[in-house]
Image (cartoon, rainbow, N blue to C red):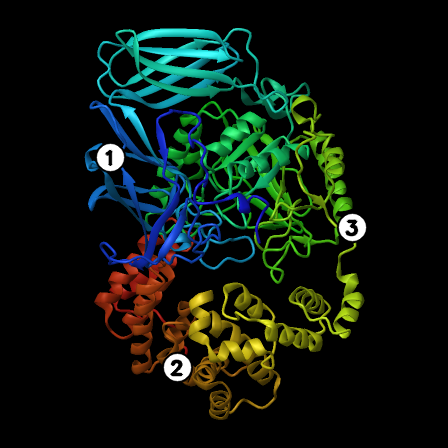
């Protein structure tokens, strides 16, 4: 699957635009293009061979990289490129700049360590002048990215994408460039408009010796200088106030940008110069004429009609194929009549915000959430990246709102952090917790004790229907997410077996549903709503609730009809005029739906067997619960495959495999290792055992006669080999402990041992959840000793930082009379549970261990 811009990408023109419009220099060299790459284990120092070429800056998992391989947490990704040392003056310096590398980058030049950087979304630079030699130089970049298995903020990226989580974007995913700069230079620029005083506050950080120099700041409008100032400087931190006469305000209606030039002069000659720009705008919570707290832009109430943009691309994942594509998303959203984008838990390249500034759209910028389980190191990593994000994006007038947390994803210290963000940047409003109250189908999930503390907004998420957040003094009421109406478009799906939305409708029903939601929103606005964020502009992987398809090729409601439905909230004058030369997408065919089943069946019965037809028939037959035809079509499809072990084909087979008679089942059973190499660890086992369970185990639960497990184990081993025997052991264990009464804890322990002797490195069950009842009910010291070894292995490999697992291991050790070691582990568990509602349970267990009392039930 690819968008219309994919064919424009080549090694010679990969994102060739200057990547930092807010601090622009002319003397630079783009390093995007083909690099050598290899993937190693974590212990490799410098690899001596490479796997091939990778196109930078596209993530290694993306199609545009030319590699399209996953990077696992225990692996390291290495890049290498030969670069030439630029010709420079003696006093000049050479900077090596990275737009972003996910997550941890270590940079070497000619075998010497240049530096390290952690943070998958922030830019960074190194002065490499002294590392470069004349002629060719070896630039190496080593990358560690645990994706969702580490302490790093990672947004929607996960190792096993599904539902609302997507494919990772590891490694270099933004532009890399060299830049020649003077030794004394402008390093950082911070501009903050004040429209009430008609001034621009400018803060400038410099590097180098500024003695006997002058700082010059020039503001221009349409090529004419409107304000200029000079001051003698010394040191490295400087400030200036620039008067802006006859202020022209920035807004989506009129996204006017002033130009800014800053120079360092010595002997009246410039020794450094950068180009930048700024917009004069103000955002605040103010009261309307009825005393209702609302969002005001430039001292005028402005309803924020927004949409939730996640910034993923089918061929580039986190990285848009071209700069034109990057701008397309913003321009198309505004053309549909929206004036706001909520950029959802992703920080974009600087050029995205440049386009937002120029095109004129309000941006709610999410910070990228910490790991949701708040594992060790995640809090400092999150706060470091929030700080760097605010510094990096401060100058963009389009950004009007910082969003601290999304729903409950890794949220903590909400009041402290909300107040910290507000103090750090008083020029924007802060949404301290978007969707802290989450409603799905009108049901509230996980009520909050003190929602939106210190926030500028009260914010709820409600799927699918919109609803109103409660009123609080001096806070605007907003709807941070709603909608999620899913409509698949055949031929334009990332995964036609996995498409979903919070609610599914037919193509013909979508416009009616959207119109109804807009009517509801209008009533909510009258009651006090200031903003709404619809989910979403584009399908993303399996999430098919976009107004456009993932490839940006099909729009599901015609442009003019969408604009008309949005017009009651946004007047669509001036800056919202449609560009006649700008084509968004083709309209959706409202008649291409499941009603074509008979028509497609006629084609099949007449002998047509192409893969596109078979896939449509498979999907429709699944939805119609026609299992016989599903198996028939799936087997016909499998016969067509010339490359059955490609990721796409194996993924499709895994989702169309419902019985042991399916050819995909046989392929997975005979090629388990090969399948796992392509789709990820335990994929084959999980797909196979799902079917074995349905056909062989589930019927045992409805039988009035208890199973003869020796017979079942022998039967499954004969039919399915070692996998069948292993799964039978696991099934016998689950049946003994969780099946019909009476419980058989002796057999539970017996089969626990037999199962984990075979499956410890690839268990189908959550080890901690399976081991706890064994601790409570089994007395056999041999079984308990084995279970303790299983938990020790699980703690070392999967459950680091998991207090429940530490607690289970400690209790097993205590029951085995190894209380000294047990106390150490229970103390670890208690430390991790500090402040949690169930902290007392752990404290009580620790006290019993120290007193020599049993921690297990005494009524066995």
Residue placed under numbered mark 1 in the picture: 128
Q: Is residue 547 left or right of residue 361?
A: right
Front one among 163 and 650: 650
Residue 715, placed above or below residue 94? below
Residue placed under numbered mark 3 in the picture: 508
Local SS, label 1: loop
- Can you tell which of label 1 and label 3 is closer to the viewer? 1
In the rendered image, the quadrant that contains the C terminus is bottom left
Distance, label 1 to label 3, CA atoms, is 59 Å
What crowding class fits label 2: few (fewer than 14 Cα within 10 Å), some (14-19), or many (20 or more)?
A: many
Local SS, label 3: helix
* Mark closest to the chain's N terminus, 2 or 3: 3
* Numbered mark located on residue 643 in the image: none
Mark 2 vs 1: CB contact within 8 A: no
Residue 848, placed above or below residue 289? below
Residue placed under numbered mark 2 in the picture: 749
Local SS, label 2: helix
In the rendered image, the quadrant that contains the N terminus is bottom right
* Residue 146 image point, x, y percent: 37, 54
* Residue 720 image point, x, y percent: 49, 85
What crowding class fits label 1: few (fewer than 14 Cα within 10 Å), some (14-19), or many (20 or more)?
A: some
Q: Is residue 373 left or right of residue 706?
A: left
The answer to which image quadrant residue 490 occupies is bottom right
Distance, label 2 to label 3, CA atoms, is 56 Å
Q: How many marks?
A: 3
* Mark closest to the chain's N terminus, 1 or 3: 1
* Residue 500 image point, x, y percent: 63, 56
Front one among 576 and 473: 576
Q: Is residue 573 left or right of residue 69?
A: right
Distance, label 2 to label 1, CA atoms, is 61 Å
- Can you tell which of label 2 and label 1 is closer to the viewer? 1
């Amino acid at each position: 699957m690819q968008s219309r811009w994919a064919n424009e990408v080549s090694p010679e023109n990969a994102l060739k635009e200057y990547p930092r419009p807010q601090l622009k220099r002319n003397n630079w060299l783009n390093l995007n293009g083909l690099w050598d790459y290899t993937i190693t284990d974590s212990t490799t120092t410098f690899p001596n061979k490479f796997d091939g070429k990778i196109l930078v800056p596209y993530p290694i998992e993306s199609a545009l990289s030319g590699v399209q391989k996953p990077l696992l947490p225990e692996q390291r990704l290495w890049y290498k490129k030969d670069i030439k040392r630029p010709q420079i003056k003696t006093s000049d310096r050479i900077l090596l700049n990275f737009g972003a590398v996910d997550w941890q980058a270590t940079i070497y030049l000619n075998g010497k360590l240049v530096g390290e950087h952690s943070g998958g979304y922030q830019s960074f630079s190194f002065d490499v002048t002294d590392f470069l030699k004349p002629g060719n130089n070896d630039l190496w970049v080593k990358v560690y990215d645990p994706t969702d298995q580490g302490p790093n903020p990672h947004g929607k990226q996960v190792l096993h994408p599904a539902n609302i989580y997507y494919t990772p974007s590891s490694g270099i995913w933004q532009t890399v460039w060299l830049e020649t700069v003077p030794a004394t230079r402008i390093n950082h620029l911070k501009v903050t408009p004040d429209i009430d005083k008609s001034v621009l506050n400018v803060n400038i950080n410099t590097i180098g010796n500024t003695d006997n120099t002058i700082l010059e700041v020039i503001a221009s409008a349409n090529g004419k200088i409107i304000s200029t100032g000079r001051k003698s400087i010394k040191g490295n931190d400087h400030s200036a106030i620039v008067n802006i006469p006859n202020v022209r305000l920035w807004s989506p209606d009129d996204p006017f940008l002033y130009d800014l030039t800053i120079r360092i002069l010595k002997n009246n000659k410039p020794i450094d110069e950068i180009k930048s720009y700024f917009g004069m705008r103000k955002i605040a919570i103010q009261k309307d004429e009825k005393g209702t707290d609302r969002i005001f832009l430039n001292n005028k109430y402005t309803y924020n009609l927004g949409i939730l943009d996640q910034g993923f691309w089918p061929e580039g994942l986190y990285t848009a194929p071209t700069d034109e594509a990057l701008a397309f998303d913003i321009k198309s959203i505004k053309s549909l009549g929206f004036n706001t984008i909520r950029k959802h838990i992703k920080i974009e390249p600087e050029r995205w915000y440049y386009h937002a500034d120029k095109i004129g759209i309000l941006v709610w910028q999410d910070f990228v959430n910490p790991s949701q389980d708040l594992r060790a190191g995640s809090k400092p990593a999150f706060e470091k990246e929030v700080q760097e994000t605010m510094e990096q994006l401060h100058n963009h007038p389009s950004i009007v709102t910082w969003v601290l947390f999304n729903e409950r994803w890794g949220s903590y210290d909400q009041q402290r952090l909300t107040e910290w963000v507000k103090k750090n940047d008083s020029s924007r409003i802060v949404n301290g917790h978007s969707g802290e109250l989450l409603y799905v189908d009108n049901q509230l999930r996980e009520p909050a004790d003190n929602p939106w503390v210190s926030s500028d907004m009260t914010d709820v998420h409600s799927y699918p229907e919109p609803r109103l957040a409660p009123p609080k003094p001096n806070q605007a009421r907003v709807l941070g997410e709603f909608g999620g109406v899913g409509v698949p478009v055949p031929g334009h799906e990332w995964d036609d077996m996995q498409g979903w939305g919070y609610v599914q409708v037919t193509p013909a029903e979508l416009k009616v549903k959207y119109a109804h939601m807009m009517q509801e929103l209008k009533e909510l606005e009258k009651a006090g709503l200031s903003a709404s964020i619809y989910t979403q502009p584009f399908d993303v992987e399996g999430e098919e609730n976009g107004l456009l398809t993932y490839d940006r090729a099909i729009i599901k409601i015609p442009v003019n009809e969408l604009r008309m439905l949005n017009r009651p909230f946004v007047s669509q004058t001036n800056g919202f005029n449609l560009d006649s030369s700008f084509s968004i997408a083709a309209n959706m065919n409202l008649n291409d739906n499941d009603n074509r089943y008979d028509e497609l069946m006629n084609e099949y019965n007449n002998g047509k067997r192409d893969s596109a037809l078979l896939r449509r028939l498979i999907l429709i037959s699944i939805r119609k619960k026609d299992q016989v035809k599903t198996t028939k079509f799936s087997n016909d499809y499998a016969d067509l495959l010339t490359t059955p072990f490609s990721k796409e084909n194996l993924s499709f087979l895994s989702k169309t495999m419902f019985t042991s008679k399916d050819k995909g089942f046989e392929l997975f059973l005979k090629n388990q290792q090969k399948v796992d190499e392509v789709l990820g660890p335990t994929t084959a086992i999980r797909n196979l055992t799902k079917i074995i369970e349905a056909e062989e185990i589930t019927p045992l639960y409805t039988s009035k006669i208890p199973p003869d497990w020796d017979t079942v184990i022998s039967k499954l081993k004969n039919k399915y080999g070692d996998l069948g025997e292993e799964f039978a052991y696991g099934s016998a264990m689950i049946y003994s402990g969780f099946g019909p009464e009476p419980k058989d804890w002796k057999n539970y322990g017996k089969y626990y041992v037999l199962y984990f002797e075979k499956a410890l490195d690839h268990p189908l069950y959550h080890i901690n959840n399976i081991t706890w009842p064994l601790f409570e009910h089994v007395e056999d010291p041999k079984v308990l000793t084995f279970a303790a070894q299983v938990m020790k292995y699980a703690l070392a490999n999967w459950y680091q930082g998991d207090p429940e697992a530490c607690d289970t291991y400690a209790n097993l050790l205590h029951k085995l009379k190894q209380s000294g070691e047990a106390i150490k582990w229970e103390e670890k568990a208690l430390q991790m549970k500090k402040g949690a509602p169930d902290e007392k349970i752990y404290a009580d267990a620790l006290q019993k261990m120290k007193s020599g009392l049993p921690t297990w039930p005494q009524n066995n």
